[in-house]
Image (cartoon, helix red, strand yellow):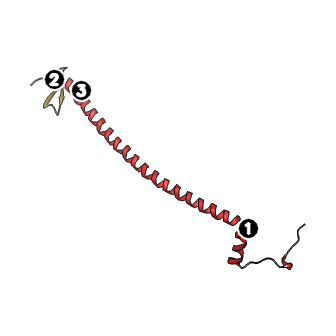
Amino acid sequence: MMQPGPEMESRGGGRRWIPRPLTGWILATAFLGVSFVGGSIFYVWLTMQQVQNGYRLARLYEQHEALLALERKLRLEWCRFQDPNQLEELGRSRFGLGPPRQDQKILVR
């Protein structure tokens, strides 16, 4: 049986001899394969994150539009309540109010 020399390395429990330059190629190939698989997984993860962020952004945009519509409605209602004629009409129709009697008036100096 051959004895391993400086250019040979023992692999697989001593049954098979693989030259040392070939082990470097095997290790480099394994490293590149693992790197490629890791890079591919990272790329797929990034793509999924991008899609999820797009959905989240669309949902936030819809919420923003709903809040803008609510703000417009509230501004319109606020302006309506600031009109004295509208307030007088609202007081008469909804709350049954009328002009004050003489005994209800207070003179402020």
Say which amino acid is labelled 1. Pro
Give the structural element (helix, strand or loop) at label 1.
Answer: helix
Between disc 3 and disc 1, whose residue precedes?
A: 3
Say which amino acid is labelled 3. Gly
93 in relation to 63, above or below: below
- Looking at the rendered image, the disc whose residue lies closer to the viewer, 2 or 1, is 1
Q: Residue furthest right?
A: 109
Pointer 3 residue: 24
Identity of the residue drawn at 52% across and 56% down:
65
55 in relation to 18, above or below: below
Pointer 1 residue: 84
Where the C terminus falls, by quadrant?
Answer: bottom right
* Cα distance in 3D space between marks 2 and 3: 17 Å
102 in relation to 64, above or below: below
Say which amino acid is labelled 2. Pro
> Is residue 25 rendered to the left or right of residue 74?
left
Disc ID at residue 4: 2
Rendering coords of residue 20 (x, y %): 20, 24
